[in-house]
Structure formats: C-alpha cells, structure tokens
Image (cartoon, rainbow, N blue to C red):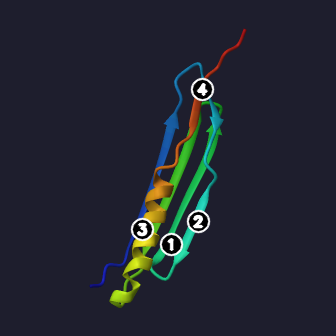
C-alpha cells in the first residue's frame, strides 16, 4: 500500500499572565527509510511558546520483516509528540 504524505502543524501557546517557562523539551529530528519527523520548540516572547511539527511519510512498499522498524519509527514520533513543557507561576516577592 502506498501512503506517502506530508503533515505540517504550527501552534503558538500563550501563557496566562503571571506564568513563565521553567523548562522546554529540546527540538528533535528523527529520520528513517519510512520518513522523517521534526519538532521545533521555541519561546517566541516571554509569554509564548511556538511549536512546529513536520511529518513526512515516504511513499513505498516494504516487506513484512520491516514492520517492527516501522512501528519503532511511529513510536518515536508518538513519544516526541507527547513531550511536556514545565510552566510555573512567577513568584515575585
């Protein structure tokens, strides 16, 4: 089955007033014979986080022996899609 396709998403998260970023996941890139995935996470302003995701699934047919490698590729993408940022309330005294 041929299933080549490209998916691109961009999100900007605006933090509520009084909150800040304590930690952000690092940007990531995964590539295999099945495609590639990139995740770019950047603070754009003091109160915003920009997330850009790109997934390219290559068109093609693979043998049944490649199924576990394909599942591993998809699992890596799923893991990266579920990374969390740490947001904290600013405590100025």
- Depth-wise, is mark 3 or mark 1 nearer the camera? 3
Measure the alpha-carbon separation of dots 3 and 1. 10 Å
Residue neighbourhood size for the residue with mark 4, other residues' Cα within 10 Å, grouped as few (<14), some (14–19), many (≥20): few
Q: Is residue 61 visible?
A: no
**Chain-order first, disc 1 or disc 2:** 2
Give the label on residue 74, or none.
3
Circle 2 is placed at which residue position?
29
When the figure is inspected, residue 44 is found, relative to residue 27, above or below; the finding is above
Extreme residue toward the left, this view: 1
Task: Find numbered disc 3 in the image and state the secondary structure of the residue it sits on.
Answer: helix
When the figure is inspected, residue 76 is found, relative to residue 59, above or below; the finding is above
Q: How many numbered discs, if any?
A: 4
Measure the alpha-carbon separation of dots 4 and 3. 31 Å
Task: Find numbered disc 2 in the image and state the secondary structure of the residue it sits on.
Answer: strand
Circle 1 is placed at which residue position?
36
Measure the alpha-carbon separation of dots 2 and 4. 27 Å
In the rendering, at what x and y percent does residue 81 appear? 46, 54
Q: Is residue 91 visible?
A: yes
In the rendering, at what x and y percent does residue 84 appear? 53, 43
Q: CB atoms at circles 3 and 1 under 8 Å apart? A: no
Measure the alpha-carbon separation of dots 3 and 2. 13 Å
Circle 4 is placed at which residue position?
88
Q: Is residue 47 left or right of residue 66?
A: right
């Amino acid at each position: 089955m041929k299933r080549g396709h490209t998916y691109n998403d961009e999100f900007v998260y605006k933090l509520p007033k009084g909150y800040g970023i304590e930690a952000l996941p690092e940007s990531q890139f995964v590539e295999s014979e099945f495609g590639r995935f990139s995740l770019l996470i950047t603070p754009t302003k003091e109160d915003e986080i920009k997330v850009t995701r790109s997934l390219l699934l290559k068109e093609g047919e693979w043998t049944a022996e490649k199924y576990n490698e394909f599942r591993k590729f998809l699992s890596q993408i799923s893991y990266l899609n579920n990374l969390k940022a740490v947001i904290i309330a600013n405590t100025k005294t």
